[in-house]
Amino acid sequence: MSPDRLRDPTAPWPVLLTVRLQPCFLASALGFHSHMTRYDRDAEIPISGDLLIRVTEAQPRLLGYLVKRLGDLDAARDVLQDVNLVICRRASEFQVGTNFMAWAFTIAKFELMAYRKRMSRERLLFHSDLLASLDRMDEALFPEDGSGNREEALQTCLDRLSQSNQELLTRRYAESLSVKSLAAEMSKTANAVSLNLHRIREQLMQCVENRLSRASHA
Amino acid sequence: MPNSDRDSSNSRESDLRIANQPERLATLVATLVEQGLTQSDRTELARILESSDEAKCYYLHYIQLHSELESQWNGGRTHLTSRRKVQASKPLSSYIMPALFTAIVATAAVLFVMLNPFARDHLHEVAADKAVIMPHRQDTQALASKHNAFDHREDSTAGVAIVVHTQGLEPGSNIRVGQRLAPGWFELLTGTVRLHFVNGATVALEGPAVLKIKSAMLATLHSGSATTRVTDRAKGFVLNSPGAAVVDLGTEFRLMVDSVGGSIVEVIDGEVELSLLGDDGTTLTSRQVMEKQKVAISPSEMKLTEIESFEPTERMDPPADHALPIDLDYVSRVESKHPIAYWRFEKLDKDIVSNEIEGAPALRMQRGEADPDSLRLIDGYLRLRRSETPRYLVTKPLLSGLMTSQHTVEAWIAPDDLRHASYLSLFPDWSQFGYQQFLLLEVATDTSWVHLPGSIRFLCRYPPARSSALGLNLFSAGMVTPGQWHHVVTRSSGSTLSLFVDGALVREIPNRQEQAERDEPLRCLIGQLTLNQNWRQFAGMIDEVAIYRRALTDEEILEHYNAVSFASGPGWAGEHR
């Protein structure tokens, strides 16, 4: 795809399935080849639309995986970018029909290890023992094959929330509004909105666990 | 003690400690998922997690749930809104692809916005640092937080206050209404000037006065007099005088500084926290000053003295409204371009605002019985004030042909302030409360998107949806001036989306969204974001709203702008861009 397409609104737009990795395309379009890192150049690989969808869908879960193990949102986002780049570079290795999430989690695991190696010991929040312990518990609590049950339980619990709580969650997650924006919009303090969101999450956690527990005893 | 016993004992002690810490753990985890933690918070979190398995379990469950909620909406799965109304006949992929696609182009738009003199240099820095992969709004935010120049909201050159009113200025003064003020010195020789800070504080200066603006929440009055009014949004606004600080707790107060550094604070309404400062700038002594109290501050004597008898200062007048100076020539120019809807707000008949175009839908006014002033027609314009309850004007779904063809939406707006507010949207009838907009127009401040405060936001979204991951945004680079009329026109020519403010093209991007295959009649909502909540209520004035089923040319838009003759009278800032 020519970078000029961004500047030429009359040029026909190709089918999305053939586009290159968009950020690299954007960087190219903006003329930053000379500043691109090795990863950026390597990442200029055609990626199938199907894989692009899978990667997009996987972002929240991958970020969650990394936040749990790093305890640091910024660091987790940085590592997630590395994970995405590796997924794109190795896109051809992924076999359609195999478990994408398992493949992506494996990459995330290796990128997490690489990140921890790069960081000095002092800068790492979670030491090895804690990380290993969290890792074991996470895999036991949330096995990959149990995600369907959790999704179903969560959906039921979401439906049971009050209208106002549903609205608040939708604003926060569907529209990705920050707590500050929500607070300004609702004429409340950011603390009040945070607290409200926190209570809803705790309510949902409880509800999901209860439903899963009942289902396992049924 | 055998190891197993010692372990058991340690475990019990740990569990005891964590038993006292669940609230703290909950706070830390909630903060972690919302905004991230400070270094000391992270250390504390690690310590708590190391202390017990219960803590680990709670921590993992909480983040897991947060990720699942993110997946529900942003990972393209089913969710509350889509289950209700998003056209269910289409395959999921047809929504995901445009979502991804529009997110990508939206990111491109954000990057183009950044290509201005004060951001360009830093773009190189970021490009070299790390490419933005999988364009995701939160990732963009993360970058913004790391590279302050990316964040217009933090950029001082963007302006933290704006001149909204002047009176009695000396001849040749370069102070003008609509002028944006960055942090720095502001000197007023004569007359009065009213400044509106982007966070919601209004400061009326009486000359001669010298004010040093430090940020949107902090200024120092070095000499002269200033009356400050603070909305809830700006609570905590600090106005310093030499040797004292007045922290506004949601109120109106007047501060006078004399030539030798002494000052007097008078609270007109509400209350303030008044601090006498030492030479290191920290509080020596402080007190709350309540409504109708006046206190003299003497830094040299290090004391605060209440003044018992005085003539109270009047409250600051709200800005006067000025009707848009429209004549029949303007009306005929609009009508000659054959809009499909044209509301002039001349007459209200049983809560119905008629459409100037025969057969076109009227606007129905909806407001709480207890708050009739929240929506009124005055002197041929619509006056809106914020309300505790939803209030808006809305049409029936009779605006057809807009989805599948070119379109232009034109309106004159004069916001009361810079608060994030939706003034017009178009949405299909199946969207029960209007969340799934096809087009949304707003004044944008304090949002989580990257733009200047007080920008005009034009969101065009196909298919109409609720997720912010869908659609393309255009933000103006200028700040609208509270209390002043602005001509805002949005245009879709099919291949491009354009935003005009005060006659000038201020933003244009390629429209890469999926083209609509079939048309759906749209409803028009004016005054707030949705039908069922009082969110993002627009406060101010609106007039001459016209919708066209074609793309007006640049010349036609400028012609309309020029057809309104403000001269240099009140009600016109004249320079948004």
Image (spheres, coloured by chain):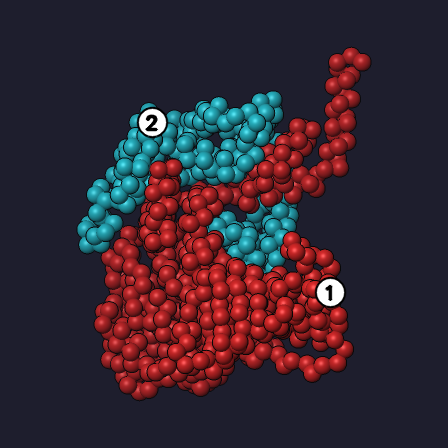
Q: Residue at x 24, y 73 (%)?
A: B556
The location of residue B555, given as percent across then percent down, is 22, 72
Residue type, mark 2 in image: Arg
Compared to residue A137, the image places residue B24 above or below, namely below
Which image quarter: residue A59?
Answer: top left
The chain to which mark 1 is attached is: B
Tell me the residue that label 2 is attached to. A90
Front-most of residues B381 and B41: B41
Colour chain A appears in? cyan
Q: Residue at x 30, y 27 (%)?
A: A92
Q: Is residue A41 left or right of residue B538?
A: left
Quarter of the figure that contains the C terminus of chain B: bottom left
Callout count: 2
Could you tell me if residue A154 is visible in this image? no
Which label belongs to residue A185? none
Tell me the residue that label 1 is attached to. B301
Disc 2 residue crowd, few under 14, some 14–19, many 20+, Cα 10 Å:
some
Compared to residue B264, the image places residue B497 above or below, namely above
The local secondary structure at tag 2 comes to loop
Disc 1 residue crowd, few under 14, some 14–19, many 20+, Cα 10 Å:
few
Colour chain B appears in? red
Compared to residue B76, the image places residue B229 above or below, namely below
